[in-house]
Image: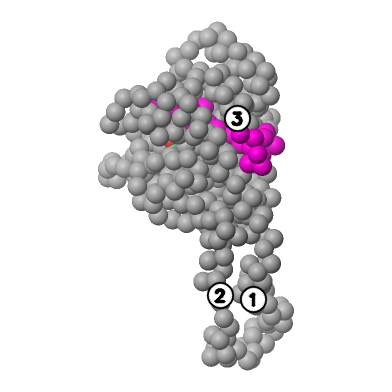
Amino acid sequence: MKDAYSPKPEHKFTFGLWTVGNSGRDPFGDVTRKGYAPIEAVRMLSKLGAYGVNFHDNDLVPIDATVAQRNKIVKEFKKALNDCGMCVPMATTNLFYDPVFKDGAFTSNDARVRAYAIQKTMNAIDLGVELGATVYVFWGGREGAEVDFGKNPQEAIKWFREAMNFLCAYVKDQKYDLKFALEAKPNEPRGDIYFPTTGAYLGFITTLDYPGMVGVNPEVAHEQMAALNFPHAVAQALEAGKLFHIDLNDQKYSRFDQDLRFGSEMVKAAFFLVKLLEDSGYAGSRHFDAHAYRTEDRNGVKDFAAGCMRTYLILKDKVQKWNADAEIQGLVKEIIVEDPKLQALSKKYSRANAQALKKAKLDRKQLVKHPLRYEKLDQLTMEVLLGVR
Ligand code: GCO
Ligand code: MN
Ligand code: MN
């Protein structure tokens, strides 16, 4: 069905190869379907209107592939991308699947594993850049602990910093046009993962050798696992100029990583997220990091992928309606109180401003009388979302 909500490449929707490649296996049960192989994924997603695909090194090239095998795979994959007009905006390293990373990659207690993680990442960066990636994601699924007495968390942060500094310098030395985006998650697969939230990474980035090269890749589900407000994390990243990438999916609060179809659970939060992204002029990919329910077959995977993009576009349309709604805008205007004189005094400290502010007449009993019509605003927003407005 082609309508106003049909995705097109200009919408910049991307999917990880691992998302439609997911075969339904979970910790309790085996595969329920054949996942889409890389070239199949490119073909299927381009038909649905996506812009590109992203991958971990080993989604495309098996970890034990010879150089000749690697080159053959890359050549065939490039051809499929070309034939379908698809691109690879982002790439990443798998630093979690192989048993060698059982105690972490950049933060493993074993210096040899840490070195191997950096080596593997340099090769994966080369692969990503060869396929056109300009954003490189770091998700440290195994960078954590179950037993805090066995690994010094301050040391672990230092090791992680050393790895980031090393890899930033590598990218600069190779003259690659590549930025890093750090993706936080509170737990799973480790009992606890270091840098559990986007905010933690935003703080850490300022301690790096090349902070300008490094931003964040927040994921809806990861903040919602911790019962946090995801749009607030995104707002902080946007405000800091650090939203280099985003992982869209959905999740009920405080559960295991559910990786649900975008917008399928917390619609109001998804609406506000789309509003933030669209109003801010965020120009990066709208990347989906989710997978179809385990109950689905291969057709269901298509329903899943199409649904992610369609819901985004429906919510984008709702954002336009919300922004153009005179009554809603009137309420917003009423809620926000401007006072140029006071704002000038409190914007920046000077001794004179401080003196004047101390003398300003601010009657709290009067101030409290200003009505804040949030009930009405929220109801009107719900009516936009529910399609009666
Ligand atoms: C997860 C993560 C991963 C990463 C991916 C890209 O919870 O498994 O979200 O899907 O996003 O490894 O780095
Ligand atoms: Mn995730
Ligand atoms: Mn993710």
Marks 3 and 1, Cα distance to the nearest angstrom?
Answer: 43 Å
Q: Which residue does the numbered mark 1 point to in the structure image? A: 334
Note whether ligand 1 is within 8 Å of mark 3.
no
What is the number of the mark on residue 48? Answer: 3
Give the mark nearer the N terminus: 3 vs 2: 3
Whether residue 17 appears in magenta in the rendering, the answer is yes
Instruction: Please report the residue visible at 47 percent of the width from the left and 56 percent of the height from the top.
Output: 229
Instruction: Please report the residue visible at 67 percent of the width from the left and 18 percent of the height from the top.
Output: 83
What is the number of the mark on residue 364? Answer: none
Whether residue 95 is situated above or below residue 365 in the rendered picture: above
Whether residue 231 is situated above or below residue 37 in the rendered picture: below
- Report the amino acid beneath label 1: Glu
Quadrant of the rendered image containing residue 283: top right
Q: State the extent of the magenta-drawn residues as a range.
A: 1-23
Please identify the residue farthest to the top as the structure is shown. Answer: 68
Image quarter hosting the N terminus: top right
Q: Secondary structure at mark 2?
A: loop
Give the percent coordinates (x, y) of residue 125.
57, 27
- Report the amino acid beneath label 3: Leu
Give the mark nearer the N terminus: 2 vs 1: 1
Q: Is residue 344 left or right of residue 373?
A: right
